[in-house]
Image (cartoon, rainbow, N blue to C red):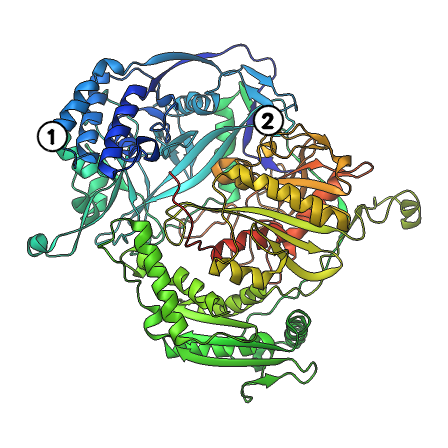
Amino acid sequence: MSYDQLRTLSFRLAEGQKSDFHSFYLLNFPESWKHELKKLQGELKNRPPDKVNLPITSLNKAMRALVPDLIYIEKNSGKLEVQRWLYSSRAIDPTALYLIIHAWVKTEFAKASDSRLQQILSQMRVEDLSWEQTTLDITQWTTAPNGTAQPGNQDSFILLPHVLAAKLSQDDVVIEFESEPLRFRRAPLSIGSQGAELVSWKPLEYKGCYWSVVITFTIQTVPFQNFPVLHCDLSLRRWVSLQKSYIPGGKETSVYLLTEVPWIDGLPYSNSFQVAPIGWKRVSASKRQEADCSKQLIWGSQLATLLDKLNPQHRFPDPAKILADPVSALNFSGSPSAAVTYRNDIKPEHRVNPGLNPGHRRLVAEQIAQLLGPQWEFVQAPERVKFSCKAPKIPILPKPTQDDSEIAETKLETLTKTQSLYRQALKNTLGDRLTVEIWYQEEATHNTLLQGIRYCLGIPDSVSFPYQFPESGFVLNLCSQRLGSLGDRLELDHQIKKQTEQLRKAIIKRGEEVGNKVSPASEITGAFIEIRPKDRFQNRNEDPKQALRRGFALVNRLTQFISTENPNLSQSVITAFLDLLRQLGVQIEPLTVEISIKKPKEQSRKEFTAHSKNNLIPETINYVGVWLIKHNSPTSADSSIQRVPVMIHMASNTNEIQVKAPGFDGWLLYRDALQQIARGEKVFGIARLEQAVPFIEQTLKCDILPLGDTLLLCHAQNLRSGWKWLQNGKITQDMVAFGIQKPLPIQRFKGLRIVRLRDSQAHETPEWFVAKENQEAGFTKGLFVMGERLFASTYNTPKQFPFNRNVFKPSTYYWNPGLLELTVACIQPDDEAFAWAALTHQLRHLALQFDEPLKLPLPLHLAMKIEEYVTLIDVEDEE
């Protein structure tokens, strides 16, 4: 069925709304406290006060766990000159807050002498904590010079969602779901997240497993649109329900708490959730016999120690007891109630799968619309853009069967043709020869890898390696070796106090071990490496994957990792081989795309072509994807902070994929760039995000624009913190600004077009479905107009997720495809904006590795994937 409209789960204020005022309270973290605590931190770290950060995260998490009805907690409140800290719908007793802060100081600065602590605490007075009342008029919005809505109150993005959440969390508000009446309670979002969250309670049950429906409200703006929108995201939250559940270490797990008695004397009662983290703590050898285990489950982020110093009037539940009998801990008939958030690595598996089907998403959304009306109404439904497109046809490798004789003739023909295309593409990209190595731990994995590679390239089982393909002369050499101790956990030197330095030493050491065992490759080589999954290492820092990535790059090899524990290994091996082709820079065809207006049914082709251009985009186009690699401490290989801008260049007249990064001697082929980045050779990280902009500008002006027409693809959430022009209130139509300069007309940059993309991170794009009146809801692929120069790129659910759209089954996994927002910011005179949006949309479906659309267009996808190879051993720590 064809759908010509989307229904986005976004709302706007109805026209003609009168002022609507609401009061809130704001609390600053006293600036004088920050100065004194930074001095103390500097003394303990033996560093200048301006070179240390306050350990504010543990205090913020304690506030989230202990203080009810906090609307927002500013995560950067420990930095100087960051004024705001806590937001609330009421002025909470400062004395109760001071007790928590007092316990936090004693916990986080425990290494200071008692006299020094007392000196600090004596300077921190309760009177320094003073709530400030603010009034929000939810209808007060102005317009930025570029036509984008901007708030009259700077805190509207934080406060407005809570006005609506308060309305939906009233006791008499019910939303029907599967004949169940749902009532909602508010819950605090993670530290620093703007918006409001509602969780249905009591939870629903399926085969002994419990779950809730979650509503998340956020306020967003849209480029060039003069009104804000309310995004309403719907999801399921599953609660750990089965006895003897196992929570892996390495990261904390959230517990949602409800209590009829405040934890701290002086705090108000609330029917809203509070959220606290739990995690594992190693038990010292002296206590191990008593504990009868090497690890103990405790309240995380220093909360356990803080609670001991705080002595709350109402005792916190024991995390170990909660996990031992999680259903009893839900405690529907009493208080406190404790619900542990389930995530996919917790065992045993939950019997409820995530996601809502579009039919129930529609059902809940329409009830929310009634509850928010008439003040709020659905945003006008985006309309489909109808266009014609000619693009390369990407070959799809059929899934293997147990017996080749079972393959239907048409499937066999497709398989043979695809294998031939892969072989020819390898020849065209790499020349005459490729070596593929298998570094394995399990014999079964080794055998499956061999079979998978043979299947992808059509190599008979009877032949040995090296093997020369008769039609092209291309030679594939395939060799195998046990990984051995190279796959063992990294040995961290705990005598080194700094974790960053521990990891660096371990990564360098493993690289040396690889070099001692593996000779440098003299020809293009890819290595399949079988290692244990990361959750099998007690400490995430012991995972050797990134160290092996760097070590094998030092001996001139690309790397593709295979897990030792994979229930679908045969298919995963094929996917892994195709991803190796991506790393090698293999393309079947150049990205030659034609976009034209779709011929109306009532018009003859002759009449139509006489009045329209056959192709609305230039014949030859340079595609440039920009990605700012931003590894923070928890995500980088060695716990350092790493910032590296990279640019991908592709073109419609070549198969080559080239990369440039700061420090490179010109452009490198994709495969060479990956190895150079992994080795850390001639690659410069940047200290400040703004430093990416001159690199982008100079590369465009000097290297790309002289080549001709260019499409520059930028990802808003990834790049706008450095390139400010990409922000909603600053982006301009057909004028571009690099750095702090004023926007210049796009004609000054001959041939340049810029499309900014935005995805669902932080709920910035709306959830959606399609449905005609009195018909079932579903999803559709296409390009839709959302506003001036604004388009939505959508696709159907992947083939592996079929479902009945109207019957909800908790055991079914419901995949809800995201909406990719395309802002056609800059085009040249006589261009059609929709054509460049259509081209960007089509670039999501031109990857060799997938028969489903990419999350991002191919040039951006390839740039983003470079993140896997970044390990800057020599990067400086950033405070």
Q: Is residue 283 above or below residue 124?
A: below
Q: Is residue 262 left or right of residue 800?
A: left
Q: Nearer the viewer, residue 311 or 355?
A: 311
Q: Residue at x 55, y 79 (%)?
A: 454
Q: Is residue 620 above or below residue 83?
A: below
Q: Say which element carries label 1.
A: helix
> Which of the two marks, 2 or 1, is nearer to us in this view?
1
Residue 789 in which image quadrant: top right
Q: Residues within 10 Å of mark 2 (few under 14, many from 20)?
A: many
Q: Which mark is residue 114?
A: 1
Q: Position of residue 314 (x, y in %)?
A: 14, 29
Q: Is residue 53 above or below residue 808?
A: above
Q: Residues within 10 Å of mark 1 (few under 14, many from 20)?
A: few
Q: Say which element carries label 2.
A: loop
Disc 2 marks which amino acid? Gly
The reply to whether residue 812 is in sight is yes
Q: Position of residue 716 (x, y in %)?
A: 57, 38
Q: Is residue 355 left or right of residue 282?
A: right
Q: Which mark is residue 729?
A: 2
